[in-house]
Image (cartoon, helix red, strand yellow):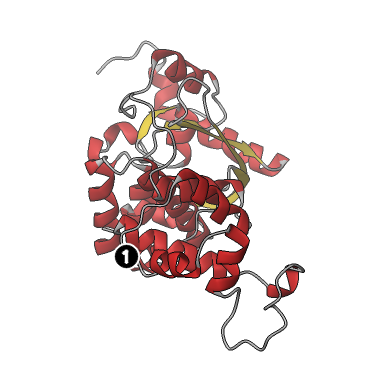
Amino acid sequence: MTNRTRELATFLRSRRERLDPRDFDDLPLRRQSRRTPGLRREEVAELAGVSTDYVVRLEQARGLRPSADVVEALAGALRLAPNERAYLFDLAQQRPRTADKPAATASPPLARLVADLSPMPAMLLNHRFDILAWNDGMAALLVDFGALPPAQRNLVWLCLLHPQVRAHYVDRESVVRDGIAHLRTAWAAHPEDQALNELIAEFLARDADFARLWAEPDVTINGRGCKVMRHPDVGEITLNFEVLTPAHDPDQWLLIFRPAADGDRTALEKLMAPTPAARSEGPGATD
């Protein structure tokens, strides 16, 4: 499992190296010749108002825990995006935490909401990407979640290790990247979550793509976008997705898929149509 101090060092170094010195008019050193990309450590130190030695020690993972003020200064110096800034605060263990434990089950109102969104595929996820609730549309699109062992009801696990779901995604690498970004930020926010640590360790050991992409400190989360799936029953289907965070449950995400075009809507309706056997049995059929 990734060590928090080493991850902080890697993250700071990667964000420093991606910056272009030409974008900083107030740096006297920016016009000097350079053999490496990005800003120098002394330039970041100057921008953040800390010593160069302090930045060096942070990037060498020498056990420092910067204060909230220093984290804020580093975030500004490195021009971090909001999600990157939040991730840095979590790595430095400076973001205020709630006393509540992360949810392992869906609250009844959220479970009803997921069901009410049918026929649009929807599911409720916790910070580990455990699937807490799903509707018929999502089951028809991906897999019969109810038939899976509880340990496999995890969206990243399914994308990485379930043969049927793996084959659904046309651009599987982008899906894995999105999952890693979510898991990385969740790991920083919930270092005490042993189940999450074990899950990430399993992915690192069992999936080469995950291990390769995990080594890149990317925390860019896509809460809205488009996914193209290849379903064995209806062929290729393009879906827009939206990720919403309930105000009362900020560690949970509501994932909703919507058809991107009329042809995709027709394909989704075909998936949701009852089978001939189900139509003949009727709603009152029993085993």
Q: Quadrant of residue 287?
A: top left
- Left or right of residue 148: residue 257: right
The image quadrant that residue 155 belongs to is top left
- Residue at the top extreme of this rendering: 284
On the image, the x and y values in percent for residue 127 come to 39, 37
Vertical comparison of 10 with 279: above or below: below
Q: Nearer the viewer, residue 79 or 157?
A: 79
Badge 1 element = loop
Asked if 173 appears above or below 271 in the picture, the reply is below
Which residue corresponds to the image point at 37% horizontal and 60% vertical from the top-left? 7
> Identity of the amino acid at label 1?
Arg
Please identify the quadrant where the N terminus is shown.
bottom left
Is residue 234 visible to us here?
no
Left or right for 177, reference 91:
right
- Front residue of 198/120: it is 198
The residue closer to the viewer here, 10 or 176, is: 10
Q: Residue at x 43, y 70 (%)?
A: 56
Q: Is residue 200 visible?
A: yes
Q: What residue did someone put label 1 on?
A: 62
Query: Residue 196's quadrant in the figure?
Result: top left
Task: Residue at 45%, 57% (x, y): give it.
Answer: 176
Q: Nearer the viewer, residue 113 or 259?
A: 113
Measured from the top left, where is residue 105 in percent x and y?
32, 24
Q: Residue at x 40, y 59 (%)?
A: 8
The crowding category of the residue bearing disc 1, from other C-alpha atoms within 10 Å (few below 14, some 14 to 19, many at least 20), is few
Position in image of residue 38 (x %, y %): 60, 75
- Image position of 252 (left or right of 3): right
Q: Position of residue 229 (x, y in %)?
A: 54, 51
